[in-house]
Amino acid sequence: MSAEEALGPTGLDRRPSAATVRPARAEDRAGLLAILQSDATFKDDERAVALELIDLGLESSVDYLLLVADLPELPVAGYLCFGPTPMTASTWDLYWIVVHGDARGRGVAGALVTAMEAELGRRGGKAVRVETSETEGYGAARKLYQRLGYPVAAVLTDFYRDGDALITYYKRLSS
């Protein structure tokens, strides 16, 4: 398949990802931090929250689980943080998904979400909730969620600040 043929109507690469997804390990922390620091989308306070959840996940927290995607030429090409939604029987939250700039457009994010959904199936998970911003910097994330079958469940206008809505996606997982 040529590069031109691999591009779908949205311009995203449709070739299978070469990413290998695995649980995060303590030695991944530096790579995870580097990904966060290299992404201009995130503000300092957002990076601090993401790093706090990374540290909790690396400490084997049951509330924050981490998956890492490795590419042959780029270990720790991306990561995903997820956990059980408090006070629900089988709903889970996807808290963070971040891909290294050099790995974008190569199926890393899709591989991470697919691996998370498979893990949730093993754990009896029935649904996934994702919250994100409506700002331009999060446009690629919104396209990813929609492409992976996550419909918009709610929009709260001016949630983060004037002109920045909270968009909630919610997907029921197949049994």
Image (cartoon, rainbow, N blue to C red):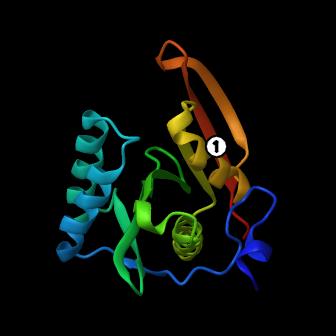
Crowdedness near tag 1: few (<14), some (14–19) or many (≥20) residues, C-alpha within 10 Å: many
Residue at figure coordinates x 50%, y 20% from the top left: 159
100, above or below 128, in the image = below
Relative horizontal placement of residue 125, taking residue 24 as reference (left or right) = right
- Which image quadrant: the C terminus? bottom right
Relative horizontal placement of residue 22, taking residue 149 as reference (left or right) = left
Q: Among all residues in the image, which is located at the extreme top?
A: 162
Residue at figure coordinates x 31%, y 59% from the top left: 35
Residue at figure coordinates x 55%, y 77% from the top left: 122
Residue 157, position in %: x, y? 60, 18
Report the amino acid beneath label 1: Tyr
The residue that mark 1 highlights is 169
Residue 19, position in %: x, y? 50, 80
Quarter assignment of residue 62: bottom left
Residue at figure coordinates x 72%, y 57% from the top left: 147
Residue 149 visible to the viewer: no
Residue 171, position in %: x, y? 68, 53
